[in-house]
Image: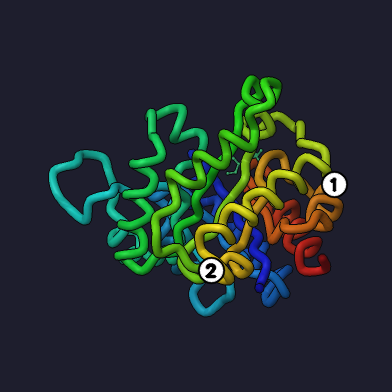
Amino acid sequence: MRKLAAGNWKMNGVAASLAEVKALLAAHPDPVCEMLLCPPATLIAQMAWAAKGSVLKIGGQDCHPKAAGAHTGDISAAMLADAGAGHVILGHSERRADHGEGDALVQAKAQAAWAAGLVAVICVGETEAQRDGGQTLAVVGGQLAGSVPDGATAANTVIAYEPVWAIGTGRTPTLAEIAEVHGFLRAQLTARFGAEAAGMRLLYGGSVKPSNAVEIFAVPDVDGALVGGASLKAADFGAIVAALSAA
Ligand code: 13P
């Protein structure tokens, strides 16, 4: 399995930000791990152009479950692919919270992503209240079961565990807590998808930065990271890419 360093730029970045992509590729032209950046939709085509001929892969941050039609402001999976994306993040906690997205919708989006040839990066994660209430495994297990469609393979699906309370806060779970959730996710996937699950990448996301990447990547069943804030700067994301490549 090739590990994956994925960056989620969220609602950040304009054309001038592509300088970071050029700097990243200059410093890391051929890392051991796979590299993915998911910019806002407005930058996908330009970033894909900037990454042309390089190993950097480009992804979207969301797609609509339908292939086309009267859905003002939405973007289809085929449009992402047409713009140069090969991946799409789905069910991020910010979309679940800001847009009321539930598991059934995330699952429909994943099917739309596959139909367009995209890899679905499906996110799960508990809130702080859920963790404090001892519900972490029940919550992420439910999200995993409800959001990942039948037919998931190591090639078409990546799972990202992102505790909501660790996103953008500088706080992270203990390494034992990360190991517990990732081990649980692997077991759930194995129960459902059999041997295929061994090859499915399980990313950890939530305040990953150069200073904690090495220890997080040493945790069993952590096959990469989904990085928010630290993916915006080439130097920080590059250090995370280097840590994962060495893991
Ligand atoms: P931060 O790395 O900024 O905590 O964000 C994580 C995240 O939500 C990535 O999708």
Which of the two residues, 21 or 240, is positioned nearer the viewer here? 240
Instruction: Relative to 47, say whether 232 is above or below.
Output: above
Within 10 angstroms of label 2, few (less than 14), some, or many (20 or more) residues?
some
User: Circles 2 and 1: CB distance less than 8 Å?
Assistant: no
Residue at 75% x, 56% y: name it.
240
Which of the two residues, 183 or 158, is positioned nearer the viewer here? 183
Where disc 2 sits, the SS reads loop
Q: Amino acid at mark 1?
A: Ser
Which of the two residues, 238 or 106, is positioned nearer the viewer here? 106
Q: Amino acid at mark 2?
A: Ala
Residue 95: x, y in percent?
44, 35
Answer with left or right where residue 109 lies relative to residue 193: left
Q: Quick check: is the Cβ at mark 1 less than 8 Å away from ligand 1? A: no
List the residue tagged with mark 2. Answer: 154
Residue 88: x, y in percent?
44, 55
Residue 162: x, y in percent?
62, 41
Instruction: Relative to 12, say whether 33 is above or below.
Output: below
List the residue tagged with mark 1. Answer: 211
Where disc 1 sits, the SS reads helix
Quadrant of the drawing holding the N terminus: bottom right
